[in-house]
Every structure is written in structure tokens, then in C-alpha cells.
Image (cartoon, helix red, strand yellow):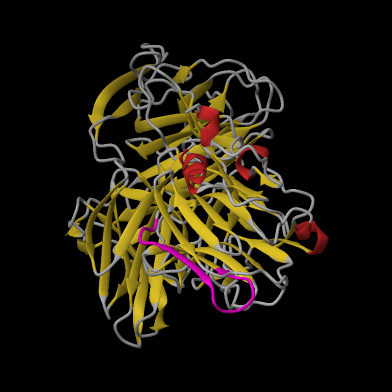
């Protein structure tokens, strides 16, 4: 048999390749009354960057200083990360500038540069950070009070204490086109002139230099022989009434048209864990610590204390859960010194706990919950834990904790280790939906509605016989018991009579054809693939279903179509209501105006 004979000779009367075209057929109307997130498969933003080499071995390879003016002891002091990798700089008493520097290329205007370094007072309390060439790009810092001193007219500066230690992170930013290279200088006061000459014999401790081409300091990233520049795929926001043609952020795969039901993030201040609505347990939160998956500098750093206990945060207000209701917690997290994060969506009724390895993207031990971990690019993961309430009660919820390993959520902290966190969400659903940002109030994202009606529908639909072909990707956390619609056709009002429905049911794929009330064509396959290509054929006497080129079922009977079907909705089951959404992606949709033989349907769904 020739290969061509395995496929139908008739061409589709409707073909929409959402995954490849990234656009709607003009006959499709789309609505969603809120914004919603998606990936466009091409937009990325600068994430981690450090243009300094040997950033922790200040005074070693690549660093320049005059031995007559400065002595350097490398690996001499305990650094902010607990390692003995900090250097001590000591002025020699010579009347000179006591500096150490690294030369970099001159940036092109208007490129921002932000220089940062960790500094601790030794026998001297003052340090100056300055850029070469530009006489106005510098700043002084007081290491005894943690205060910024004099700042040059073409610069801005910050100083931040590292936990409760005597280390400070100092930064200076400039947009000067002539700022080439940078210097760290031991100076006499917080008002010292730029590139001050003095006769000091005092010292400072220094570690972790970083240079970034951006307007503010971000998380520190260590380097050795090479500079570091990473990018992250950017989670974008689709405007109101704009369809989302979504992409996998790590593989770049085009997923097609995203269709989600309405959902509410029950948390407030979902990106600001420093807010009082979050109870911190033996931990601290640093805001603006890193670049988040949406490309903004809103990721926060969760750092453990030195207590022998759990270290994390949870929603302060008790949550009134309902017995037998499913709830899902999600958060984006990225490893730093710690590689494990623990989600505790509820602390009682039941006590649900899920461990996640942020270094490997693997799920650890689960207690009273299910879980997924999904890569979001550049080391970020979206972690999800779902539980079913066993009582109607007020409970603590949405806990996020550090761990030393799988099962190691209670331990003696070191005071500096942590992870990055962003975008927490808590939904009264058995699976997660896309992120819904909140501030002082809960927020609801509206449903995606894509449909064809009237002559737009009837122009391609054959009421007497036909075959539908759908390529879809459902929500990968979808439980076997949850119904998810793939598409539904009907008379404009949701009902059993005069409807065609293809959907994922309770541990099965099901197709209903109700052309004129009962008797109906009912097709069931006892599998529930979350990624599949499915065909469904119908006529007055026979119908069939084929899944992924192999699994099939068919039924014969009396199924006359007396009309009444005048619309289709994508990603939703039409049967009785429109609340059973796919919560996933339609990659391709086609309709053939004939009942295609089952063997050819197998070829279509297997190709």
C-alpha cells in the first residue's frame, strides 16, 4: 500500500495551525477581560552579569596595584558566604593613592555601569569606589555607620548591610561614556575627594567585586577566568482581549493557543515577601535581589538565620479551607547557597509538604500532596504542590522553607545561605494555572474565550458527516479526575441536545455527539494523555475516535443530524456548561467535511 493511501484525499474545510502561525483565523473571536502571562519564544532579558574576572580573588590574577602603596593578603578573611576567600588591603603609609583596580573596555553611551563590592572595616572605616577617566563617577562609604558619603555628580550609590554582620555591599552606578575601568581606594573619610592621596597605614577587607551593564546592582555572581553574562526568557503580559500564543521557555517549542479558565490568586502581595502579610520564620527577605522570570528586578532573597529550626515564611492570615476542596500552591524559586526548597501549602487538615531540588529540577519527598516542578529558564523553576482538604477549618498556608536536602527542613542555619523566590500563588483548584500577580487584594484572571459562530462556523462545518482533528497539550498537573474540554460545538446555549464535545474525562478521553437529543453517539477511550493528537468522526450511522495513531474506538447506530449546531468554542467542553476548560494549549485544529475511515484517522493522529 502506498504511503499516500494512508491519508485522506479530501482536504480540510478548516485548518488552524496555531503553533506555527501564532495567529487566529479572522473568523475566530477572542476575549479575556484581564491581562495574562505568556512566553513569545524570542524575548529574553539580561539576568546575571559580572564583567569582573577573578571576582573573589581581589589582588590576584588580573588585578593591578602598586606594592609600594598597598599590600594585599588574599584568602585571608572569612567572606560573607562563609568561605575564607576575602582579601585584606593595607595602605603602606606612602603618600599616594592606595588603590587596586581592574581595567575594562570603555562602554558606549548611554550604557549604564554598576560597580559593587563587599567591604568590611579593618583598621580603617572608609572606602571609595571610582571609575577611571570620568572625574565625577565615584562614591565614598562609611563602613562603621553603613552610610553613603560624598557621591560624584555623574554617579549614584548604595550601601547595604549583609545580614547582621559587619560586612556591607557598596555599589556605585554611572551612565558616563568615558568611565573605563574601576578602582577601590582606602580613604580618610566619607567626604574624601576622588582618587584621594593620603598617608594611611590602615586596612579594609574586601570580597566579591561585580560590574554590570545596568542601572542598579543585582545579585552577586562569582567569576574566575571568564566574565559572566546570562539571559533569561521573559515572561510577558498579554493585553486584555489578546490571545496567548505560548512557548516553552526552556526548549523554545511553540505550544499554540493557550486556553485557561478563570482563576483567583488567594494571596496578597504575591511578589513582596517582605510585607507584613508574610510571617518570617528564622529568616530574612532581601527585596530586589535578582532578575525575576518576568525580566524585572523583583526576585527576592530568602536567607536563613543561625537558629536550629525551620527557616522560611508563610501567609500571616489564617485561611478558611473547605473540606474535600483541592488547593494548589506555586512559587518560582532558584538555587543560591541552598538547593532545596520546601512548599507547605497547608500546615494542618492535612499537613501537606513537598520538597524540591532546585539544582536538578527533581521532586523529593511528598506528604499528603502531589507536586510538579517546571523549568522557567536560567535556573528558575516553578514549584507546585496540591492537597485536598480533609476538614473545613482555618489553617496556616502557603509556606515556603529552606532545606539542606530531601527531608532536611529543620536545621541550624549559618546566617547567610538562601534561595531566590518570586511570584507565589494559591488557588482553589486541583492544578496550577498561569501566574496572577497581586498587591493589597486578591486578583482574578478572566477566562480565555475563543469561538466561531454563525456563518463563520457554518462556512466549513458539514452537519451530515465529518471528522475533527485536534493536536493539544493539556495542563501537565491535571489530575485524572478533572474534566478538561478540548472543543465543543453547540446551538449557542450550553446543553446536551445538539452538541458535539471532545474532552478529557475521569481517566479517559470522551466524545459526545448529540445531534437531536437521544440516542447519542458516546465514544470513550480509557486513557487520558495530557499530550495528544486526536481525531473524532461522526455521521448519521457511525462514529469513531483515534488517539496518537493507535488507540481507537467506534460505534454504530442511528444518529441523524437535524441541525441546530451553529458555533464552536476551543479549549472548552460545550456539554451543559462552559466551565470545563482545557487549561492548556491547542496546537492545531482541523475539520474534514467527510467521515474519514478509521485506518486513515490512525495515520493522521500518528503523523
Q: Is residue 182 visible?
A: yes
Q: Position of residue 331 (x, y in %)?
A: 42, 58
**What is the total number of numbered labels drawn onto the structure image?**
0
Extreme residue toward the right, this view: 455
- Decide: is 593 above or below 541: above
On the picture, is 320 further left or further right than 341? right
Query: What residue lies at 39% left-to-right and 79% top-to-bottom?
Result: 325
- Decide: is 163 above or below 113: below
Q: Nearer the viewer, residue 77 or 289?
A: 289
Q: Quadrant of residue 82?
A: top left
Query: What residue lies at 54% left-to-right and 76% top-to-bottom?
Result: 519
Decide whether residue 517 is among the magenta residues: yes
- Decide: is 101 above or below 568: above
The residue stretch that appears in magenta: 513-528
Q: Quadrant of residue 69?
A: top left
Q: Position of residue 37 (x, y in %)?
A: 60, 54
Q: Nearer the viewer, residue 249 or 514?
A: 514
Query: What residue lies at 53% left-to-right and 16% top-to-bottom?
Result: 104
Q: Nearer the viewer, residue 121 or 349?
A: 349
Q: Is residue 279 visible?
A: no
Decide whether residue 326 is among the magenta residues: no
Q: Position of residue 26 (x, y in %)?
A: 79, 50
Query: What residue lies at 29% left-to-right and 82% top-to-bottom?
Result: 390
Amino acid at each position: 500500500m502506498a504511503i499516500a493511501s494512508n491519508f485522506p484525499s479530501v482536504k480540510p474545510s478548516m485548518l488552524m495551525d496555531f503553533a506555527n502561525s501564532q495567529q487566529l483565523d479572522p473568523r475566530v473571536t477572542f476575549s479575556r477581560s484581564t491581562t495574562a502571562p505568556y512566553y513569545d519564544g524570542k524575548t529574553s532579558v539580561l539576568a546575571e552579569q559580572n564583567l569582573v574576572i577573578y571576582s573573589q580573588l581581589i589582588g590576584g590574577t588580573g588585578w593591578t596595584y602598586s606594592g609600594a602603596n598597598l599590600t594585599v593578603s588574599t584568602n585571608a578573611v572569612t567572606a560573607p558566604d562563609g568561605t575564607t576567600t576575602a582579601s585584606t588591603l593595607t595602605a603602606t603609609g606612602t603618600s599616594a593613592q592606595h588603590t587596586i583596580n581592574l581595567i575594562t573596555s570603555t562602554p558606549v553611551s548611554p550604557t549604564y555601569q554598576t560597580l559593587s563590592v563587599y567591604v568590611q572595616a579593618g583598621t580603617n572605616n572608609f572606602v571609595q569606589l571610582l571609575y577611571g577617566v570620568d572625574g565625577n563617577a565615584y562614591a565614598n562609604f562609611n563602613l562603621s555607620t553603613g552610610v553613603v558619603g560624598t557621591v560624584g555628580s555623574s554617579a549614584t550609590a548604595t550601601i547595604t548591610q549583609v545580614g547582621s554582620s559587619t560586612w556591607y555591599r557598596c555599589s556605585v552606578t554611572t551612565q558616563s561614556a568615558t568611565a573605563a575601568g574601576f578602582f577601590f581606594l582606602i580613604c580618610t573619610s566619607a567626604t574624601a575627594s576622588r582618587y584621594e592621596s593620603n598617608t594611611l597605614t590602615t586596612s579594609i577587607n574586601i570580597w566579591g567585586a561585580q560590574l554590570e551593564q545596568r542601572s542598579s546592582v543585582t545579585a552577586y555572581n562569582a567569576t574566575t577566568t571568564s566574565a559572566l553574562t546570562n539571559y533569561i526568557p521573559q515572561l510577558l503580559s498579554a493585553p486584555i482581549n489578546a490571545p496567548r500564543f505560548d512557548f516553552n521557555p526552556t526548549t523554545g517549542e511553540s505550544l499554540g493557543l493557550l486556553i485557561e479558565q478563570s482563576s483567583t490568586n488567594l494571596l496578597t502581595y504575591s511578589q513582596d515577601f517582605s510585607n507584613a502579610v508574610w510571617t518570617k520564620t528564622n529568616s530574612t527577605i532581601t527585596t530586589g535581589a535578582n532578575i525575576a522570570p518576568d525580566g524585572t528586578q523583583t526576585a527576592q532573597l530568602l536567607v536563613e538565620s543561625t537558629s536550629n529550626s525551620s527557616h522560611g515564611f508563610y501567609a500571616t492570615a489564617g485561611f478558611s479551607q473547605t473540606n474535600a476542596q483541592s488547593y494548589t500552591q506555586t512559587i518560582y524559586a532558584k538555587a543560591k547557597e541552598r538547593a532545596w526548597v520546601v512548599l507547605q501549602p497547608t500546615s494542618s487538615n492535612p499537613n501537606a509538604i513537598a520538597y524540591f531540588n532546585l539544582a536538578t529540577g527533581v521532586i523529593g519527598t511528598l506528604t499528603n500532596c502531589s507536586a510538579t516542578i517546571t523549568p522557567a529558564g536560567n535556573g528558575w523553576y516553578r514549584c507546585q504542590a496540591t492537597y485536598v482538604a480533609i476538614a473545613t477549618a482555618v489553617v496556616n498556608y502557603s509556606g515556603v522553607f529552606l532545606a539542606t536536602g530531601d527531608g532536611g527542613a529543620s536545621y541550624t542555619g549559618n546566617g547567610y545561605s538562601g534561595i531566590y523566590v518570586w511570584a507565589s500563588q494559591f488557588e482553589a483548584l486541583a492544578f496550577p494555572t498561569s501566574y496572577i500577580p497581586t498587591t493589597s487584594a486578591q486578583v482574578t484572571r478572566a477566562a480565555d474565550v475563543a469561538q466561531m459562530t454563525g456563518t463563520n462556523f457554518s462556512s466549513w462545518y458539514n452537519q451530515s458527516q465529518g471528522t475533527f482533528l485536534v493536536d493539544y497539550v493539556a495542563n501537565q498537573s491535571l489530575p485524572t479526575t478533572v474534566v478538561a474540554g478540548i472543543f465543543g460545538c453547540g446551538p449557542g446555549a450550553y446543553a446536551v441536545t445538539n452538541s458535539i464535545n471532545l474532552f478529557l474525562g475521569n481517566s479517559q478521553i470522551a466524545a459526545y455527539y448529540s445531534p437531536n437529543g437521544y440516542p447519542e453517539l458516546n465514544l470513550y477511550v480509557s486513557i487520558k494523555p495530557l499530550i495528544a493528537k486526536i481525531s473524532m468522526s461522526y455521521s448519521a450511522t457511525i462514529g469513531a475516535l483515534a488517539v496518537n495513531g493507535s488507540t481507537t474506538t467506534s460505534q454504530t447506530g442511528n444518529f441523524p443530524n437535524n441541525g441546530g449546531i451553529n458555533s464552536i468554542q476551543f479549549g472548552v467542553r460545550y456539554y451543559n456548561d462552559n466551565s470545563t476548560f482545557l487549561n492548556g494549549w491547542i496546537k492545531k485544529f482541523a475539520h474534514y467535511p467527510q467521515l474519514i475511515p478509521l485506518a486513515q484517522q490512525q495515520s493522521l493522529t500518528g503523523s
